Image (spheres, coloured by chain):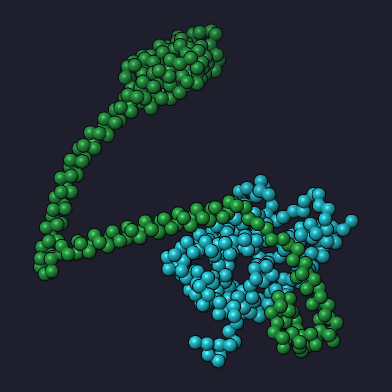
Amino acid sequence: MNCERTKEFLADYLAGELDEKTLAEAQAHLAGCAACREELESLSAIWTKLGVLPKEQPSAALRSRFYDMLEAYKEGLEKGGTAARIYQTISSRLSRLMPRRPTYQLALALVLIIAGLGSGYLLNVRFRSNARFEVATLKQEVNDMRRTVAVSLLKQASASERLMGVSWSSRVDRPGDEIITALLETLDHDPNVNVRLAAVDALYLFYGHPEVKDGLVRSLAGQTSPLVQLALIDLLVGIRERRAAEALERLIQDEKLNPKVKKRAELGLAQLS
Amino acid sequence: MLESKSIWVSPNDIRRFVDPTSDNRLMEEVGAGRVERLAILFERHHVMLFNFFLRLTGNRSHSEDLVQDVFFRILKYRKTYQGQSKFSVWMYQIARNAHVDHLRKRKQEMSLDDQFEEPASPEIPAVERLNSDIDISLLRIALDRLPLRKKEVLLLSRFQEMKYREIAELLGCDIGSIKSTVHRAIKDLGRIYLELQGGESP
């Protein structure tokens, strides 16, 4: 055996996979070849060294997870099996109902199709009107609930709850007078600037109501915070409310007015006229 | 039934085909619907498999997840098992696929959170006095620096009781290339180990 051939067997040598004859031949070569001997020694040293890597134990959770999975899989399999058997009996029963002659089969098929279409149509008509009615009722109920929640939140002592009330009222589809009044009330009298600003935004959604426009114009005179004043001017100019012009003029006369607000009011006045 | 030629069949092979509790028979039963028999295979192999993954990934919880994944896949694909290949060969095929999928998934996650994750490779604990402990740590780091292919082949032959012939079947290549891969892997490992040791000595 030469060096090259011996190298091919080194892996077998390490794993103990050599048969006796080849082992003897390889050993004969190794005895006479220092280079191969050295190579084998360094290889088998590290091969043996790997033995110090301990065998670790997995946690107990692994075993219980496996058994849970096996159990679940088995259950699923059994259920699936029963379902398949039931399906088979039903389909064999049904197949007995089928007439033998093709003509009758065709006739039966036609009758079934017509019956199916007819009953489907009837059911659909009924169901639709019913469903439409139910959905409408439900919508109404949700809307009523939102309205109640919004109004009661607007009357809370904490500013964050009142803010929530404002946001709830903007989700009401058709706000009643109650909501509008509550929002205008908030806009005029709420001590918190953020809540008043939110009320401006919410009222923007309902500006189609005549009372909203009136209220907004009236409110402009009473506001003290520049932020709310700016928001109101933006809104009134945005919806092109002509009656706001008068209120703006009066606002500009005010000497204590914030210069930025004054500028915006003058600009708004120009835009409105 | 044993004809004159059959004397070359090893006792192990006979057990494989005749013994009702051999892995192959059990797996065939699982395939035929007696899934509870998988419990015996689990008890026989799960610790070995866990250690295989632990040495591949260096992470205990990932390794446990991978073992669970392998047995789940065995159930899922139980009908595709064909008795001609040894059960463990088939199982390690599934294990390799599970590991590849795991790596792919980790790669995607890594891009998001690699700076927050602990490194997958085992680090040497700060206080380690016993030489054998240092040996273990160095070997683990050295193993971790081998390319995946070499590492897999080495682990399978050294720790998972697999013959070169079986590893060749598992990886779908010829036995000669497996042997030379083992040879080179051991050589590389030795070199890396020595380098690490050199870096360690004061």
Q: Quadrant of the C terminus of chain B?
A: bottom right
Outermost residue toward the right? B202
Q: Percent x, y for residue A159?
A: 50, 18
Q: Percent x, y for residue A232?
A: 45, 18
Q: Residue at x 81, y 49 (%)?
A: B127
Q: Nearer the viewer, residue A182 or A78?
A: A78
Q: Nearer the viewer, residue A179 or B27?
A: B27
- According to the rendering, which colour does chain A have? green
Q: Quadrant of residue A8?
A: bottom right
- According to the rendering, which colour does chain B have? cyan
Q: Residue at x 64, y 75 (%)?
A: B163
Q: Quadrant of residue A128?
A: top left
Outermost residue toward the bottom? B4
- Residue A230 seen in this snapshot: no
Q: Is residue B10 above or below residue A53?
A: below
Q: Is residue A39 above or below residue A147?
A: below
Q: Residue at x 36, y 15 (%)?
A: A181
Q: Percent x, y for residue A104?
A: 10, 65
Q: Percent x, y for residue B162?
A: 63, 72
Q: Residue at x 43, y 21 (%)?
A: A165
How many numbered marks, from 0 up?
0
